[in-house]
Image (spheres, rainbow, N blue to C red):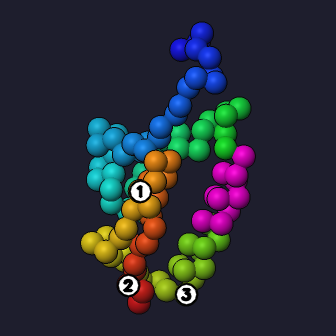
Amino acid sequence: MADADPANMLIINDTANRDERALDGPDRIDLHRPVNHHRSSGKGPYLHVGVTLAWIKGRVSLGEVMTHWHEWETDNERARTAGTSSDRGRAALPARLG
C-alpha cells in the first residue's frame, strides 16, 4: 500500500463501524454503547475537515432533545438507512418522546 498511487485508489467505507466482532448489534442505535475507536471520519492528518462541525451539531441537537424530553426511545423497526455508497447513516429515525 505504501507504494500505491492515491489517484488510483477508492475508499469504500460502507461497512465502517459495522463489524459484529467489534460492536454488539452494529445496526442498533445505542447511545450508551462504550466508545469505539472507529475511523469513519478519518484520523490524524486525514481527519475529515467537516467532522468538528458535525460533532458540535450532534452534541447540540441531542442536548436539546434530552433537555426537553427526559425519556425517549428510538423506533428501530421504522428507521430507514440512507443507503448511499458513502453514507450508512439514517435517512429517518422515528422516536417516541415522553
Crowding near the residue tagged with mark 1, few <14, some 14–19, many ≥20 C-alpha atoms within 10 Å: few
Quickly name the residue at label 1. 83
Viewer-side residue, 69 vs 19: 19
Viewer-side residue, 52 vs 31: 52
Viewer-side residue, 87 vs 26: 87
Q: Quadrant of residue 58?
A: bottom right
Task: Give the CA distance from mark 1 to mark 3.
Answer: 31 Å
Q: Which amino acid, by three-letter code, is at mark 3?
A: His
- Is residue 16 located in the magenta-colored stretch of the structure? no
Write down the region rendered in magenta: 49-58
Checking the image for residue 96, the label placed there is: 2
Left or right of 83? Residue 77 is left
Q: Nearer the viewer, mark 2 or mark 3?
A: 2
Quickly name the residue at label 3. 68
Q: Which amino acid, by three-letter code, is at mark 1?
A: Gly
Give the mark, 2 or 3, whose residue is nearer the N terminus: 3
